[in-house]
Image (tube, rainbow, N blue to C red):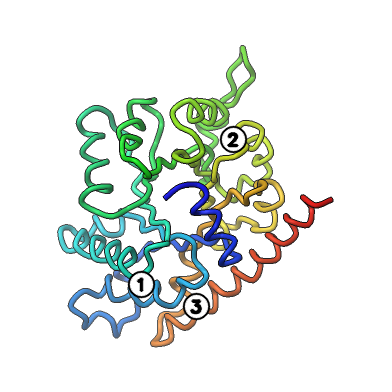
Amino acid sequence: MNYRDIYNKIQKKNSFLCVGLDTDITKIPEFLQKEEDPIFEFNKQIVDATQEYAIAYKPNTAFYEALGAKGWESLQKTAEYIKKNYPGIFLIADCKRGDIGNTCKMYAKTFFEQMPFDAVTLSPYMGKDSISPFLEYEGKWAIILALTSNPSASDFQVIQEKESNEYLFEKTLKYGQLWGDENRIMFVAGATQAYKFQQIRKIAKNNFLLVPGVGAQGGSLQDVAEFGMNDTCGLLVNSSRGIIYASNGTDFAEKANESAALLQTQMKKLLEDNKNSQRK
């Protein structure tokens, strides 16, 4: 899947929504616990209920790894279900890997050969060696952590180099440009840092940004669009808890649909505003 494929899907659905499948076994509706695979059944119903509005899905692998082999099986089934039934969906493994050498190659093999993911979130702290094995797979993406939403992101990401006055997240963006083009590289940029998106866009003008932190974490969709949207949208905005846990009753899928629809309505307006501003 390339840049144009994603943009075309955004135009078709009038949406740039990514639904985070951070599926916690302790939070899913109690009646699902009787299912053979409660996690998969929950994910399946969430996906079916939200796919008309979603461009992407992003399972956070920690919630599956915590359950051992059974959790990995649920993750595999979820990924395969999405790709079989909704093949145009962009599928992200949110695993934040960041190793090198043969270890890194094995991680790439896991998510791109054993599982049908289109992209993997990666930590670039160890440099190009931690990214390049993922770029050996044609049509697959590396999503590099650049500027995250968490409170302690400032511990490292906004350290400023004395000679160049560049922040560490800016250097990360620049190196990412050298490792691959906008058809292979995305960056994670947290919604709570939206005021810094103008700095990000000076460096990563065309790259897609995967944006967590809207909703439960306090990020503003309006601010993200104002400062981060480019001519081709260039955003995948993630919502997890606000959609998948909109209800813990028998109507959980229906409420997820309503929450996703509400975000899509807001996104449609922002996309229209962006097109109108380009015409001026």
Mark 3 closeness class: few <14, some 14–19, many ≥20 residues within 10 Å: many
Secondary structure state at the residue bearing disc 3: helix
- Tag 2 or tag 1, which sits nearer the N-term? 1
Write down the residue under mark 3.
257
Query: In this view, which residue lies farthest toward the bottom?
Result: 250
Residue at the spot 57% in from the left edge and 51% down from the top edge:
235
State the image coordinates of residue 56 (x, y, percent, origin top left): 45, 60
Above or below residue 143? Residue 279 is below
- The answer to the question of whether label 1 and label 2 lie on touching residues, with beta carbons closer than 8 A, is no
Residue at the spot 75% in from the left edge and 59% down from the top edge:
273
Residue at the spot 52% in from the left edge and 60% down from the top edge:
9
State the image coordinates of residue 228 (x, y, percent, origin top left): 65, 46
Q: Which mark is residue 204?
A: 2
Secondary structure state at the residue bearing disc 1: loop
Secondary structure state at the residue bearing disc 2: loop
The amino acid type of the residue labelled 3 equals Asn
Query: In this view, which residue lies farthest toward the top?
Result: 163
Task: Point out the frontmost of discs 1 and 2.
Answer: 2
**Number of disc labels:** 3
- Tag 3 or tag 2, which sits nearer the N-term? 2
Report whether 276 appears left or right of 268. Answer: right
- Tag 1 or tag 3, which sits nearer the N-term? 1
The amino acid type of the residue labelled 2 equals Ala
Write down the residue under mark 1.
27
- The answer to the question of whether label 3 and label 1 lie on touching residues, with beta carbons closer than 8 A, is no
